[in-house]
Amino acid sequence: MSYERTDDIPGADGGDGRQEPAPIEPEAIRILTDPNSWLSGGTAGSSSTSTETRAYSDDFRLSEGSRVAVIGGGPAGSLFAQFLLKTLNRTGTSIELDIFEPRNFDFCGPAGCNHCGGVVSESLVQLLAAEGIVLPDETVQRGIDSYVMHMDVGSVRIDTPLQEKRIAAVYRGHGPKNSEISNIPGFDQHLLQRATRLGANLRPQMVTSVDFTTGRPELTLADGRSENYDLLVIASGLNSALLSMVEQTGCGFVRPKAAKSFVAEFKLGADAVERHLGNSMHVFLLDLPHLQFAALIPKGDYVTLVMLGDKVDEALVNAFLNAEEVRKCFPERRPPPNICQCFPRLNVSQARRPYADRLIFIGDSGVARLYKDGIGSAYRTAKAAANCVSLYGFSSSDLEKHYWPACRKIIIDNLMGKCVFGVCHLIQKLAFARRSVLRMTEQEQNDANVVPRMSSVLWDVFTGSAPYKEVFLRTLHPVFIARLMWNLCAANLRIPTGKKPEVTAT
Amino acid sequence: MIGELGRVYHDGEDIVTEGEVGDCMFIIQHGTADVIRNEEGEATVVDTMESGELFGEMAIVENTVRSSTVRARGTVRAITIDRKTFMRRIQEDPSLAISVLEVLCHRVRNLDNTIAHLKHQLDMLSGGNS
Ligand SMILES: Cc1cc2nc3c(=O)[nH]c(=O)nc-3n(C[C@H](O)[C@H](O)[C@H](O)COP(=O)(O)OP(=O)(O)OC[C@H]3O[C@@H](n4cnc5c(N)ncnc54)[C@H](O)[C@@H]3O)c2cc1C
């Protein structure tokens, strides 16, 4: 069975052949982030017009000719397909694997994008490379080698220990709105192409419903056709109405909770980006209500703004953009009008029971890392699911034994993450704490002989490179606590650090 | 230039040096590097690494010194994979080691070919001399 990839997702074609979506207001983008909104005909739940007949294996193992459906061609879906096909290739088993992905990653702007900051963490860059997935130079919009932390009390730069650009800033789609000439090959497209090169079939169709009444997953597609599979992997992210549909099948799955966040793109031009932001990600610890984390990420000609929090709305975005610490990162201290924006949803809790017989939820649809490195947790859950399916099977008990532990590990680490972000939030609120963090970090960055304890904690919190548990334990080290206490006194008594800071404190 | 990951090594610069302790392996993002082995004071190029290739894994796996020098031929950009990141992940997911095993298998196969080729040449030479 072969399927041609088409670009005819209803509602995504601006009519000029370049498939440019209509001008987008934040509200409209919010709707676009739900792929179901692309459907013009409302085919959800429509009855099947063709159901394939074929003998399916009765046990919960893949064998020659088994059929696997992956809903969603984001990082979780594409990576799952790659890992599964690679392992089965080693054992000489050939299966049919379909990835259903209606989004065309060749579109610029929100229609071709899975809405995210696009930071591929240091640890993920390394692990993907070890898996043989090397990110091409064209996809990496900027190699990041440092972080600059901005607070009202001053700013400090934290460099990677190796002076190496180890973090990749990418676009998930084909770039921001109106960036056609830049011809940016996106991250998701790269991963999806790798999956198809390994033998996955890309089916550019929306899955509108899932049914398990026959004991096997039966998918209904946007064109009304139905298809049966041996195994269904749901990697449809958070924004899919499909998740609530599966919730109602009684398999025990409960979708993850989500909060609204904000992503916007500013076009500054490569020179201005270089001058004002360089190869650093700029993170802001500002005392603004409901703001958990905000960052400016330099990418080629553009800068991406990401804001995470429990209630990110237009008023908060405006307050943030008007903060002096943010304004000074832009030419003439004035952020230009943004050219692309969206309010995507972000996982704030995990799904309940992200597996059942013949069914697995991976990536954001199942369990994701709190606030950071969501692509990294998509990789981890995809890999664990592929290993379980190829080596053990896909009954509920197989998945509980061999897939669930990977999810549980992320969930437990997220509990630690909550503590870590709780402390960050406290620092955001308390000026004397901000001053001491700034002083301690400055001292470490300006003196090579000082062990960078605070810098490494901040680095791992901002980059999401290390497990939260490890970060948390590092803050309990007696030397860390002693130095923090000393800096707490010294910073608030204004005792100078002795060396000139690289980035000025105010 | 800006969209580039890793560290740049200039022509002739050593990325790793034979005999040094290593705690990371490398992937070449861009460029070509020579693998050089010193035998009795004489440097011999024993292999060439291209973009996308992994090296330095032996020092990570065995915790020994680097067995050869890898030197940039032209400009090379490479990223490192830390032993800690790699080993920690292997604890969680042993299958990650298979990708390194594949590299090692490939290298052993190449070595077998080289040995067979050299043996053949040696036989020819000794045959020709007798
Ligand atoms: C504001 C924000 C910033 C973020 N920044 C970062 C960051 O910098 N770094 C990082 O690592 N993570 C970041 N994340 C998290 C990251 O975006 C997610 O964790 C990651 O995208 C999860 O990948 P996924 O494949 O599970 O889901 P997604 O990337 O959401 O992919 C799901 C895919 O499924 C498809 N789909 C949905 N429904 C259907 C259907 N019914 N039929 C067929 N296909 C369907 C969609 O089109 C989509 O392509 C951020 C998240 C937010 C909200």
Image (cartoon, coloured by chain):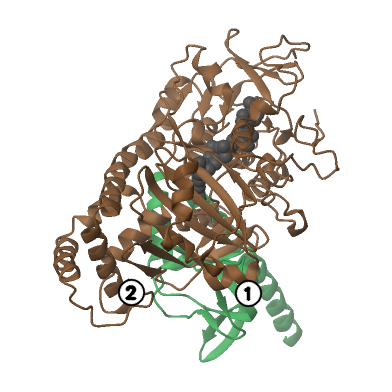
Q: Residue at x 28, y 45 (%)?
A: A422
Compared across the picture, whether A128 is left or right of A41 comes to: left
Amino acid type at mark 1: Asp
Q: Does residue A444 appear anywhere in the picture?
A: yes
> Front-most of A198 and A440?
A440
Q: Which residue is mark 2?
A: A445
- Rendered position, A237 above or below B31: above
Chain letter, colour green in render: B
Question: Disc 1 is attached to a residue of which chain?
Answer: B
Res B115 visible: no
> Image quadrant for the N terminus of chain A?
top right
Q: Which chain is brown?
A: A
Label 1: state its secondary structure: strand
Q: What quarter of the picture does the C terminus of chain A occupy? A: bottom left
- What is the x, y in percent for residue B67? 47, 75
Estimate the x, y position of residue A200 in percent, counting from the top left.
70, 37
The reply to whether discs 1 and 2 touch (Cβ–Cβ < 8 Å) is no
- Rounded to the nearest angstrom, the CA distance separating label 1 from label 2 is 40 Å
Left or right: A47 in relation to A121: right
How many labels sit on residues? Answer: 2
Checking the image for residue B47, the label placed there is: 1
